[in-house]
Each structure stands twice: as C-alpha cells, then as structure tokens.
Amino acid sequence: MRKIFTDGLVIFISIFASFSVENYREANIEKGILNDAVITLGEEMVSNIDYTKEHLKQVKNIHYINDKVINNFNTISSKEIFESHSTNPYVHVFNIAGEISYVKKYNDESILNILGSWNAWEPEKVFFESMLNSGKLLEIKNKKLRKEIESIYTKQQERVNGMALATKNHTDNAMNWFLDTQNKYNYDISNNIIFDKHRSQELKNILKTKAIILELRISDLENYLQSIQNVVLLISSEYKKLD
C-alpha cells in the first residue's frame, strides 16, 4: 500500500509540476507578447512626436503669416506674402518617398493656397487601435500609463483634430470670399489681383477670427506634444526590447 501511495504521489507531483511549468511558459510568452506590443506602440508614438513637431511648425507659420497680413492689411502685397512664406513655409506636397516638400514657387493664383491652407491633422494610430480591439491595452498593469495612453489617442488627438477642422471650416470662408469677389466680374481675374486690388474688411475679419482659432490650436498641439513625450519616456523606462 505504501508503495502504491508513494507511486501515486510521485505521479501527481510530476503532473502538477508539468502543468506549472507549462503555465509558467505560457505566462512568459504572453508577457513577451504584451512587452513587444507596448514597445511597438511606443515606436508609433515616437513617430507621432516627429510628425507633431513638424505639424506644429507648420501651424505656427500659418499663424505668423496670417497675423502679418492682418497687421499690414492695407499695404502688404501678394508678392510680399509669398516671400514670407518661402522663409516660413506651410503649403506642401509629398514626394514619391513620402517626404514633405514645401511649395516655394508661386503663380497668379498662389495667394489662394497661402490664405486658404489649413493643414490637416493626421497622426498614426493603427497600432493603438489594434491593441484596443485585441484587448492588449487592458493588459497593461500600470493603470496610470494605460490611462494616459488612452487619453492621448482619444481625448487629446480628438481635440487637436477638432481645432484643425475648425481652422478648415473658417478658412473655407476666405476661399468663398475670393470666389464671390471673382464672380462680380464678367471676365477672368486672378486671385492675386483680387487680393492686391480688391481686399475688403470682410476678408480681414475672416483672418482675424482665424488667428484666434490658430492660437488655441497651437496651445493644444503643444500640450499634446508634451503629453506624448512623457508617455514615451515612461514606456521606455518600464518596457525593454527582448532578445
């Protein structure tokens, strides 16, 4: 009986040990997957830091030129505005490699691009949405880190995007002013001439309201940038790449 009991106990311990080893192995695998996911999310956020710095520079340049036009409204020419844009650019295109190329060549209609640009806000959020949908975000044990990540990708990005759309909606008023003014003529007239010779208080009022929106937008972008930099620093201190 003692031998049977001993053999049974050995078998039980062996089975229990094998289950424990397997559970430990699976737990380590899951931990490694979460670790890699958070690190990848951190890399996405680093990319957004670089994007935000460039975007913030663009918005500040929009604000600078917008203010320059307001402050010199009766005397500034479209040519002078183009010269200011060449040193403080924000109108841009993307080349084949996806790199930003700022527009510094101008034509008879270019004033519309300068005064009509609002620059969309398009940060990366693919991996955040993947973690959110897979439930991996909820597995982050550091509650403060998890909440700050959620806040950045939801509340803060949504607010910055809302201010970008507010800029667009108000800038549309400037675009409409140019079109309405052109439509008063029964012949072709360029937008540069419209601005140089037919600017009105209505256009100035539009630009003054746009300046207020841009100030709020810049403040939101600066707060977002500081928040995302803080979270990236926290991620880098808690999560390391596994060999």
Image (cartoon, grey):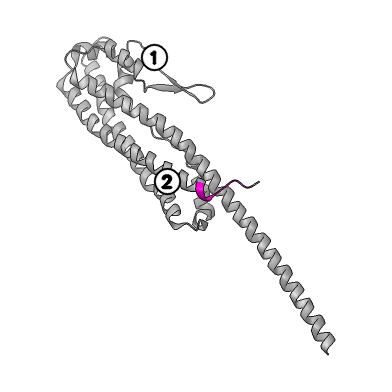
Query: Which stretch appears magenta?
Result: 237-242
Residues 78 and 67: in front is: 67
Magenta highlight: main SS: loop
Furthest residue toward bottom: 1
Total marks drawn?
2
Q: Is residue 212 left or right of residue 231?
A: left
Alpha-carbon neighbours of circle 2 within 10 Å: few (<14), some, or many (≥20)? some
Question: Is residue 3 inside the magenta stretch?
Answer: no
Indicate which disc, 1 or 2, sits on the residue closer to the N terminus. Answer: 1
Residues 183 and 69: in front is: 69
Q: What is the x, y in percent for residue 128?
A: 49, 46
Q: Which residue is identified by label 1?
A: 104
- Amino acid bearing label 2: Tyr
Callout 1–callout 2 Cβ contact below 8 Å: no
Q: What is the x, y in percent for residue 168?
A: 31, 31
Q: What is the x, y in percent for residue 140?
A: 50, 56
Q: CA distance from mark 1 to mark 2?
A: 34 Å
Residues 149 and 199: in front is: 149
Alpha-carbon neighbours of circle 1 within 10 Å: few (<14), some, or many (≥20)? some
Q: Is residue 54 left or right of residue 108?
A: right
x 54%, y 24%: residue:
97
- Amino acid bearing label 1: Lys
The answer to whether one can see residue 150 in this image is yes
Q: Quadrant of the N terminus?
A: bottom right
Furthest residue toward front: 237
Can you tell which mark lies on residue 153? Answer: 2
x 27%, y 12%: residue:
80
The answer to whether one can see residue 129 in this image is no
Q: What is the x, y in percent for residue 82?
A: 31, 14
